[in-house]
Image (cartoon, grey):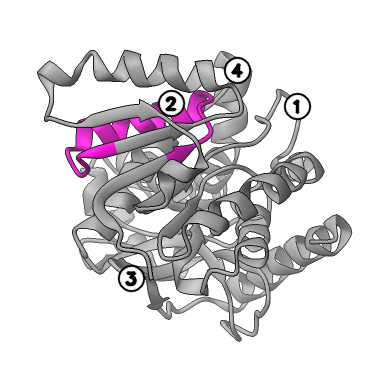
Amino acid sequence: MAVLNGRKVAVVGCGFVGAASAFALMESGLFSEMVLIDANKEKAEGEALDISHGLPFSKPMQIYAGDYKDISDAAVIVVTAGAGQKPGETRLDLVKKNVGIFKSIIPQIAEVNKEAIMLIVANPVDILTYAAWKLSGYPENRVFGSGTTLDTARLKYILGQHLGVDSRSVHAFIIGEHGDSEIAAWSSANVSGIPLNDFCEMRGHFNHDESMRSIAEGVKNSAYDIIEKKGATYYGIAMSVRRICEAIVRDEKTILPISGIQHDNHGISDVALSMPAIVGKNGAEGTVPISLSEDEERALKASADTLKKVIDDAEI
């Protein structure tokens, strides 16, 4: 068994998301060593240099471009490599391209490091998490996706704006696919322990069904809106990567909606999708049961069926 450096992180893929994630991880102070890997070595070298030049304003850290052999002792491996989502393209349109890329990348990672926690960020994240699990031979608790962590943050942000309250006081989850079939789990949502509808009425909002529809659509379409306006999304997901890594490195046992392999969870098995899970130094330490309405249960099963069909078609 390799001895891992608990303060070392690897970022595989130095596109917009990988570079932004590397910057967020440097700012976090969680790690003392970071290796960047990209098919274009010069791109990785440029990003490493650019981020390193800000170190006098941050905390001491070694940041460099490397090869797969350089990740043999990394405790956390963040995989952002893959083709990006283009305007008008759904996350699921990316499947065939990115599964092909993963068939090259993941075995190279597993060959040099079998003990790390592998965090999949590339899209479509649920399909690629499943592919990474199959291709790596990693146990399920140590390979999972960023899932709906960002979607959930978007939901909290939009709800916070709607209610005029700090988004950190909003407790709600987006579950299922990170994509078009995602579900806002309204039945378990609350604001500091107060049921959501009750809190809405305290703040003068009474048209609950219309508001819930509008807010859920706003969350689902956030990425498309951003991509249309600026070509790509990367800051929000970079902060999600930082948050997940923080939970791992600090062994926080934080509950986050990450994408993991499901086993008879609400009747769903053998597919990766997002449900709240406890995240700590051992990775995903078990899912958290949340109560769902019958409609939410049906929508979750439909989301799982959508993903299973894609997995079958992609021949993972």
Q: How far apart are the two marked residues, 4 and 1, measured between alpha carbons? A: 11 Å
User: Residue 19 shows which numbered tag?
Assistant: 2
Q: Examine the rendering and report whether any part of residue 202 can be seen.
A: no
User: Residue 88 shows which numbered tag?
Assistant: 1
Q: Are marks 4 and 2 in contact (CB under 8 Å)?
A: no
Q: Which residues are magenta?
A: 11-33
Q: Is residue 35 left or right of residue 203?
A: right
Q: Which of the 4 image quarters holds residue 83?
A: top right
Callout 1 amino acid: Gly
Residue at (44% x, 38% y) in the render: 11
Does the magenta segment cover residue 24?
Answer: yes
Earlier sequence position, callout 3 versus callout 2: 2
Q: How far apart are the two marked residues, 1 and 2, measured between alpha carbons? A: 24 Å
The relative height of residue 51 versus residue 25 in the rendered view (above or below) is above
Residue at (50% x, 36% y) in the render: 67
Q: How far apart are the two marked residues, 4 and 3, measured between alpha carbons? A: 36 Å
Quadrant assignment for the N terminus? bottom left
Earlier sequence position, callout 4 versus callout 2: 2
Q: Are marks 1 and 2 in contact (CB under 8 Å)?
A: no
Earlier sequence position, callout 3 versus callout 1: 1
Earlier sequence position, callout 1 versus callout 2: 2
Per the image, label 3 sits on a secondary structure element best described as loop
Q: Nearer the viewer, residue 198 or 242?
A: 242
The relative height of residue 176 versus residue 163 in the rendered view (above or below) is below
The mark lying in front, picked from 3 and 1, is 3
Q: Which residue is mark 4?
A: 231
Callout 3 amino acid: Asn
